[in-house]
Amino acid sequence: MENTKLQVIKGDITKQEVDAIVNAANSSLLGGGGVDGAIHRAGGPAILEECKQIRARQGECPTGEAVITTGGKLPAKYVIHTVGPVWHGGNQNEPELLASCYRNSLALAEENGVQSIAFPNISTGVYGYPKEKAAKVAVKAVREYLQQNNTSLQSITFVCFDEENYALYEELLRDH
Ligand code: ADP
């Protein structure tokens, strides 16, 4: 959609009142630290239960792919769990895998009627992806998705937890 709103805010993704928030999960889907821990804590046990059911059906979630659960007690209706790449120096297909996280999350959101979605800065915590490189991949992947798809999404928000990421996204989104 020409007029899908693309924006950045600084804040806590668990507090976002959107249709879906994205979780930077690990392939076990059984929870972890960082934003994953925060989402499971705030959303309550229903999310983990659903993740376990998904695991029982399809096994682990491969890097770059995404699965969806409800949002439990969160303001968001859904959580889309995607598995970012661990940074190994940049020659292990990391940019393509990170771009896939954004693309697959957006596609899964749309399949579920989501109109507003919020992303954390996938892979830039424990997984060690350099923040500036990750921000460029994220913004490019989302922009390309919007160009290539006739989307019904109304808003896409990058929720940055730290000042460095916030400044990077502000700069990247200002250019257009
Ligand atoms: P990964 O394993 O993909 O690197 P992390 O959870 O360690 O995932 O970090 C991903 C990003 O999420 C980091 O930039 C981190 O600062 C950020 N983050 C952590 N907690 C929250 C939160 N509550 N809301 C939004 N972003 C968060």
Image (cartoon, helix red, strand yellow):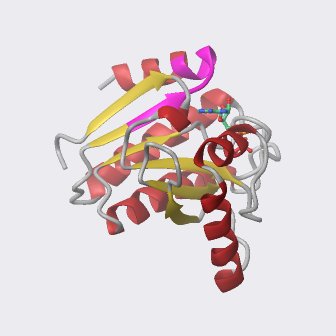
Is 85 displayed left or right of 132 in the figure? Answer: right
- Out of 73 and 7, give the one closest to the viewer: 73
In the displayed orientation, state which residue is furthest to the bottom: 57
Quadrant including the C terminus? top left
Query: How many discs mark residues in the rendered view?
Result: 0
Q: At 38% across and 25% down in the image, what residue appears? A: 173
Q: Pick the residue in front: 131 or 52.
A: 52
**Residue 87 appears left or right of 83:** right
Residue 53, above or below 69: below
Q: Which residues are magenta?
A: 157-166
- Is residue 134 or residue 53 the one in the foreground? 53
Q: Position of residue 105 (x, y in %)?
A: 47, 58
Which residue sits at x=71%, y=52%?
A: 85
Name the residue located 68 percent from the left edge and 53 percent from the top edge: 25
Quadrant hosting ligand 1:
top right
Taking the image as drawn, is residue 45 in sight?
A: yes
Residue 12, quarter of the rendered image? top right
The image quarter in which residue 171 lies: top left
Residue occupying the point 65% across, 77% down: 53
Q: Quadrant of residue 58?
A: bottom right
Is-magenta flag for residue 165? yes
Q: Find the residue positioned furthest to the left.
A: 2
Residue 95 appears in the rendering: no
